[in-house]
Amino acid sequence: MSSPISDLTYRGYQGGLAPDKSRWQVIFRQALRMALKKRAYWILMVLSGAHYLIFIAVSYFIDSFAGNMGGEQLKEQFFNRIIWRDQFLQGFQLGHFLLMSIALLVGAGAIANDNRSKALLVYLSKPCSKRDYLIGKWMGMFVPIAMALAIPATIFYFYGAMNYREFGFLTDDPWLYPKVIGAIGLASAFQSSVILGISSLFDQGRLAGAAYAGAYVLTGIFAGIAQTIAANQKLPESVMPWVDRLHYLSLYGGIEGIYKTVLQTDGSFSFRDRGESFLVPRPELWLLAVVVILPVTGLLWAAWRKVRAVEVVG
C-alpha cells in the first residue's frame, strides 16, 4: 500500500558554490592524477635524469681515487673544466628523448581521446567554458612535464650545493637555481602548448602521439641535415652564423635554445674535450622568439578552433 510523501517542502542546495575561476582546476586535477598514477611516468623520470647520476658516480670515483691513491691532479683537472650551469643543459640534452616520451604519455590523448569519446559534449554542456577546458588540459600537461624536469635537476642541485661548494658550485652563479627553474618552466610550457595543439587535431591519442613524435624527430633530422650540408660548403665567414641558426629550426632545438638563453651558456663537454667548434652558440632572442612563438601561437589557435561541443540537429 502506497502512502503520500509527508514532506513536500522544497529544499534548496545549502553547500558552497565554487567560483568561475576554479572550474579549470577540476579538469587539471583529474589530468594530474591520471599522469601520476602511471608507473611509466616515474620510470621515465628516473631514466631521464641519467646524466646527473652519471656525473655523481664519476665525480665520486675521482674523489675516492684522489683520496686513496694520490690522484689529486686528476681531481683538480676534472673539476677545473666543469661549468656547473652546463650540467643542467647536458641533463636535458642527454635525456630529451625520454622527456619527449613523458610528454607523449601525459599529453598525446588529452584532447584526442575526448574527441573520440565525444566527451566534449559533456564538458561543455556543464558550466565549463572552452577556456576552462583548455586551461585545465594545458595545466594537466605542464605540471607533470615540469615535474619530470625539475625533480632530478633539484636533487642534483642540492647534492652539488652540499658536495661541490669547494669547486665553485654556489659561487660561480648564485642565481643558478632560479635560472634552472625558469628554463624548465619555459621549456615545459613550450612542449605543453605544442602537444595540446596537436592533440586537438586528432580523435585518437595514438595518432596524436605519432604526429608529435614525428614532428619532434623529423624537424630535428631536417635541421641537422641542413646544418651539415651548409657547414660542408665553402661559405663566407659572414654566412656561417646562419648555419648555426639552422640547428634551432626544430622542436628539440627550440627547447635547447630556451635552456641556453636562460642559463646564458653555449654548452661545454664535461667528460671529453671535442673543442668549441662542435658547440652551437645560443640563439639570438629574435630567432628564439620566432622558433618558439610561431608554433605555439598556431597550435593553440588550432586547439581553440577545434574544441567545441558537437551540435545534434533533430
Image: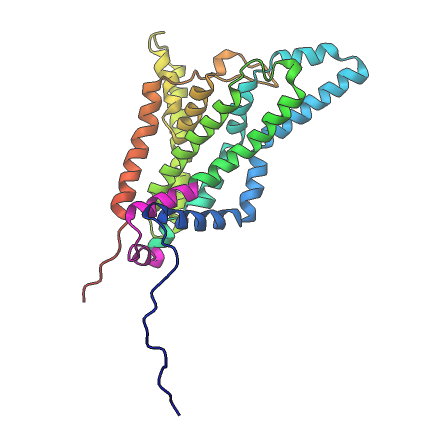
Residue at 56 percent across and 13 percent down: it is 172
Residue at left offset 58%, top offset 13%:
171
263 sits to left or right of 13: right
- To which quarter of the image does residue 253 belong? top left
Q: Quadrant of the C terminus?
A: bottom left
Instruction: Depth check: give the residue in front, 69 or 133.
Output: 133
Q: Nearer the viewer, residue 111 or 170?
A: 170
Residue 65 position within the rendered picture, expressed as x and y whole percent measured from the top left: 76, 18
36 vs 184: above or below: below
194, above or below 76, in the image: below
Is residue 200 at least partly visible in the picture? no
Secondary structure, magenta segment, majority class: helix
Task: Tell me which segment is drawn in magenta.
Answer: 116-141
66 in the magenta segment = no
Q: Is residue 37 above or below residue 185?
A: below
Whole-percent x, y for residue 48 in the image: 55, 35
Furthest-right residue in view? 68
Q: Is residue 138 part of the magenta span, yes or no?
A: yes
